[in-house]
Image: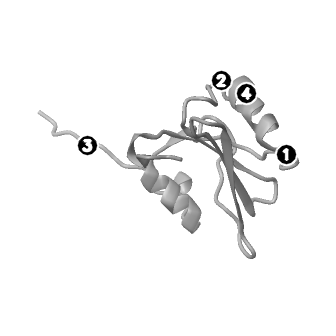
Amino acid sequence: MITDISKVKIFVKPGPTDFRKQINGLSIIVQEEMELDPLNGNLYVFCNKSRNRLKILYWDKTGFAMWLKRLEKSKFPWPRNFKEALEIDLEKMKMLLCGIDFWNAHKELKFSKIN
């Protein structure tokens, strides 16, 4: 069980994932494609091709756990490649679950004073 979610990192696997894969197949994707350690207690988020299902994989110190969410209508916003996203914070995870597409939100502009 995750005791302190604020200390957990959340990683998104951009692009569609074959949802026939279960815990073993997803943990291999984390290791080989994402080049991360599936045993470190972080959350790994996957989306199917139709973008109506999410799977979240994590190690809870005694074994793997997997969570699934299926939308009855609508689609999840989802990045297409690693340049768009890989690690997200808890606020963005909440937005993702609510259907808010923060990947296509306005980018923050930074200006400095001209001397």
Q: Secondary structure at mark 3?
A: loop
Quadrant in which the C terminus is drawn: top left
Using the rendered view, name the quadrant where residue 81 is placed. top right
Task: Indicate the amino acid at tag 4.
Answer: Glu
Please name which of the two marks, 4 or 3, marks the residue nearer to the observer.
4
Task: Indicate the amino acid at tag 2.
Answer: Glu
Using the rendered view, name the quadrant where residue 43 is placed. top right
Return the residue at label 4.
Answer: 33
Residue 109, position in %: x, y?
Answer: 34, 47
Residue 64, position in %: x, y?
Answer: 67, 40
Mark positioned earlier in the residue sequence (1 or 2): 1
CA distance separating discs 2 and 4: 6 Å
Whether residue 105 is situated above or below residue 39 in the rendered picture:
below
Extreme residue toward the left, this view: 115
CA distance separating discs 1 and 4: 13 Å
Mark positioned earlier in the residue sequence (3 or 1): 1
Q: Secondary structure at mark 2?
A: loop
Few, some or many residues within 10 Å of mark 3 (<14, 14–19, 20+): few
In percent of the image, x 77 and y 41: which residue is there?
23
* Circle 3/circle 1 CB separation < 8 Å: no
Return the residue at label 3.
Answer: 111
Q: In the rendered view, does 19 fall on the left or right side of 101?
A: right
Task: Indicate the amino acid at tag 3.
Answer: Phe
Few, some or many residues within 10 Å of mark 1 (<14, 14–19, 20+): few
Mark positioned earlier in the residue sequence (1 or 4): 1
Return the residue at label 2.
Answer: 35
